Image: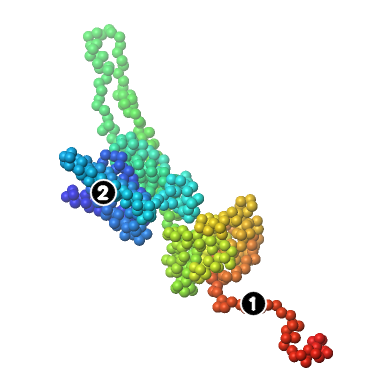
Amino acid sequence: VMILLSVSGVLTLSVSYSLSVQCLNPVCLWCLNPVCLLLSVSSVLTLSVSTAYSTFYIVGLVLSMQIPFVGFQPIRTSEHMAAVCLRLLQAYAFLQYLKDRLTRQEFQTLFFLGGPGCWGSLLTVIYLTYTGHIAPWSGRFYSLWDTGYAKIHIPIIASVSEHQPTTWVSFFFDLHILVCTFPAGLWFCIKNINDERVFVALYAISAVYFAGVMVRLMLTLTPVVCMLSAIAFSSVFEHYLGDDMKRESPPIEDSSDEDDKRNSGNLYDKAGKVRKHVSEQEKTEEGLGPNIKSIVTMLMLMLLMMFAVHCTWVTSNAYSSPSVVLASYNNDGSRNILDDFREAYYWLRQNTEEQARVMSWWDYGYQIAGMANRTTLVDNNTWNNSHIALVGKAMSSNESAAYEIMRSLDVDYVLIIFGGVIGYSGDDINKFLWMVRIAEGEHPKEIRESDYFTPQGEFRVDKAGSPILLNCLMYKMSYYRFGEMQLDFRTPPGFDRTRNTEIGNKDIKLKHLEEAFTSEHWLVRIYKVKKEENRDPLVHSPRSSSSSRQKYTSKKVQDHPHFSLL
């Protein structure tokens, strides 16, 4: 029965592991590597633990590899090799087992015969790594240790908002009071250390570091924070709400009784110690009074109640609203729903061909493919950095150069996000510098980030902005016809509410693109790429009228005396 329970537990853990990988791919790294580290530094690597881990690793690995975006990554990337390296410890344990079972001569023979096989396996791994079959550490892995690596070498990683460092506000926003109770729970674990608590401590310390490097890794920190905070609260409640009778020490005989027994026959000796009152003895023996217990207990309960209220509010306002539908609030508290994204995607699905290709920044690739059912050049998978850089180059170039790129990619429509009308800060103009940096990484001769700044090093969209910026494709598509719009009587026409400035180029003309759709609040704008003409226009050389008349008139007419008057 115990064997069946153990097998069922390992299988359940493997299924849970595969489901976690579906939600967040780095979980496969986070679950396996700390376990391998624990088994390496502790003494829990027994036969049963080794069997359970091997079963979990194989079954969980096979299940996770069925996920399309995971594929063969667990066996072809260097980040996952720590789980494989644990086999070295198992091999060492197996050698110790054989050493106890075999004679010295037999063990030496086996060792010399198996040595070349081990060296061959090691050389095979080195060869596969050198040839690229086992991928080296990825840029995301390097950026965990060197926070400036991604911005210099792989800008697309640094451009993702999830890869930004976590601020203290984010820690408090997501964890609330657990930020303070988490270290206390860790101290309680270290105070009474054992193999299980070593794993929790390693998990907590590593999770805190990595969550500080990337905000997305806050998901890996929250489980251990909840566990350690629960230990802290439990310890406090156990200390202040525990049964006093159970913790009461055996009664100690008062010293005054001993003095009475010793001096029972001498009535005139010096006076002994005065016996304390019973209530005074209780106050002396009891370290904490009922008032202190009540105050601490009520304080802990109030903190837990505030934590529950905060979690409910955060879940409702921050993590329950879809990103495709925006909401704004008026001065009177009424709410406005901005449905521009769905409006634009519905227009794409209803008014474009099924084979139409849409070029946009990669942030909106999944939404266009899922809601508009149209082909996109790049999407949120971001697996092809060179392709994303080519799209960034098209957005950063002038219209003629961008048109050549779009025709080479068979682009039919271009979709951009513009927040200058409603003050939406997540539009493409605010993301534009990342497009330039990513494009510069692949095309450094054509695109340079410094060209889009003013001589003072400022990124401006007004008249003082860089001429290259004011004539690039992204700027033209964002501010096309925007110079004719006056949003408020207090602001001039073409006033950008997001950048709080008047745009510098109001007279924008498009040659190779035409406006196809603009949503209600101008949040989503779609442009159609004009097709090439069937034949090139004829180039006519200039000619004078007199020569043409002389060419097509007869000699007799030219000799007429009044011909010059014509």
Residue at the outermost bottom position: 556
Looking at the image, which is closer to me, 306 or 400?
400
* Residue underneath mark 2: 117
Residue located at (25% from left, 21% from top) = 253
In the current view of this chain or complex, which residue is farthest to the right?
A: 561
Q: Which secondary structure, mark 1?
A: loop
Left or right of 266? Residue 524 is right
Vertical relation: 262 (above or below) 13: above
Label 2's element?
A: helix
Name which quarter of the figure residue 397 lies in.
bottom right
Which residue is painted at 16% across and 50% down in the image?
Answer: 1
Q: Which residue is mark 1?
A: 539
- Residue 340 image point, x, y percent: 50, 65
Three-letter code for the amino acid on which mark 2 is drawn: Gly
Asked if residue 513 shows in the view, the reply is yes
Amino acid carrying label 1: it is Val
